[in-house]
Amino acid sequence: MIKNIYKTWVLIVPFLGLLYSCTQRKNMDTRNKSTAKNYELVWEDNFKSKKLDTTKWNRQVEPAGRFNKEWQRYTDSEKNSYIENEQLVLEAIHTSNVHKINQYTSARLNTAGKFDFTYGKIIAKIKLPSGKAIWPAFWMLGSNIDENGGDTPWPTSGEIDILELWGTNSASVVEANVHYANASGKHTQMGAEGYHLPKGDFSKDFHEFEFEWTNEKMIWSVDGTSYHTLDITDKKYYAFHKDFFLLLNIAVGGEIAGYPDESTPLPQKMIVDYIKVYQKK
């Protein structure tokens, strides 16, 4: 009897997984069609080319410790960012046998100077990395930031975190946030708001992340479920009524994410199937 039950489940479980994946894809297609009714597509990357499209993306090069005392250095190497199976891959690599600063390489891509916009809806299908001190993000910075040729320092330029995953905490939770300057010019933030995946974790499969941004509000969603809304009509949110550009990266370690050790599985990959940006018709 037990053997028969076991055999039945061996057959059913893969079927249920396939059914879930098919349902998820169908829901994504339905949501994309719904979006098309109210919005028009203004920018996208489906990663169909053999190499990263450098008319759309910059590979940002930064030394280890440049941001938040993180341990990785960001490179322009195709080992850290490349196209594979018509998907974008960002890969964080441990380059030695020791765990300390400058012993890791990773990728930080942005669209600065190539694509930016004010207000719209962003939809991206992404499979995230996980592990202690692994910190992937899909986010936006104000186009006037001095880091990329503008005249305004962070946080006055503004930052929108579409998603962040803190591998040290949980691979089942992504967080939304915004950062800006208060009246005194000091850093302040919305405060992280999390979405907990009902089953499994974000490193096991692709999920669709959506961010809607209007002149009145911001809405964060995962797989069609909205989990946080921010009213940005207050004048303190002035930074969020101008152009922003897109970023993708995997950080390793730092004073915020903690630090990797022997328990951290490496390399780690962030895989992006597509990114689409829409604006109202």
Image (spheres, rainbow, N blue to C red):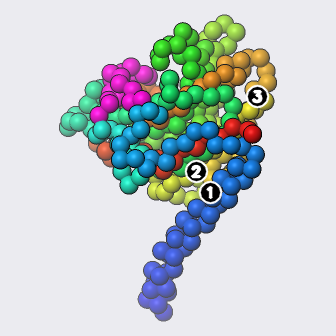
Q: Position of residue 33 (x, y in %)?
A: 68, 55
Image quarter of residue 237: top right
Label 3's element? loop
Q: Amino acid at mark 3?
A: Asn
The earlier-in-sequence mark between 1 and 3 is 1
The kind of secondary structure the magenta stretch mainly shows is: loop
Spatial CA span between label 1 and label 3:
26 Å
Is any atom of residue 231 visible in this view? Answer: no
Q: Residue at x 20, y 36 (%)?
A: 96
Q: Nearer the viewer, residue 39 or 206?
A: 39
Residue denoted by label 2: 208
Instruction: Tell me which corner region of the image, top left, top right, bottom left or bottom right, holds residue 74.
Output: top left
Who comes first in sequence, dot 1 or dot 2? 1
The one of 96 and 74 positioned closer to us in this rendering: 74
Q: Is residue 64 magenta?
A: yes
> x, y (%) of residue 110?
47, 30
Q: Quadrant of the C terminus?
A: top right
Q: Are marks 1 and 2 in contact (CB under 8 Å)?
A: yes
Q: Which of the numbered marks, if any, corresponds to residue 215?
A: 3
Q: CA distance from mark 1 to mark 2?
A: 7 Å
| Image coords of residue 230 (percent x, y) | 73, 32
Q: Identify which residue is drawn at 44% across, 22% down.
A: 68
With respect to residue 258, does 241 lie above or below? above
Left or right relative to 267: residue 254:
right
Is residue 266 magenta-colored?
no
State the separation of the CA atoms marked 2 and 3: 23 Å
Residue type marked 2:
Glu
| Region in magenta | 58-77
Q: Residues within 10 Å of mark 2 (few under 14, many from 20)?
A: many
Q: Residues within 10 Å of mark 1 (few under 14, many from 20)?
A: some
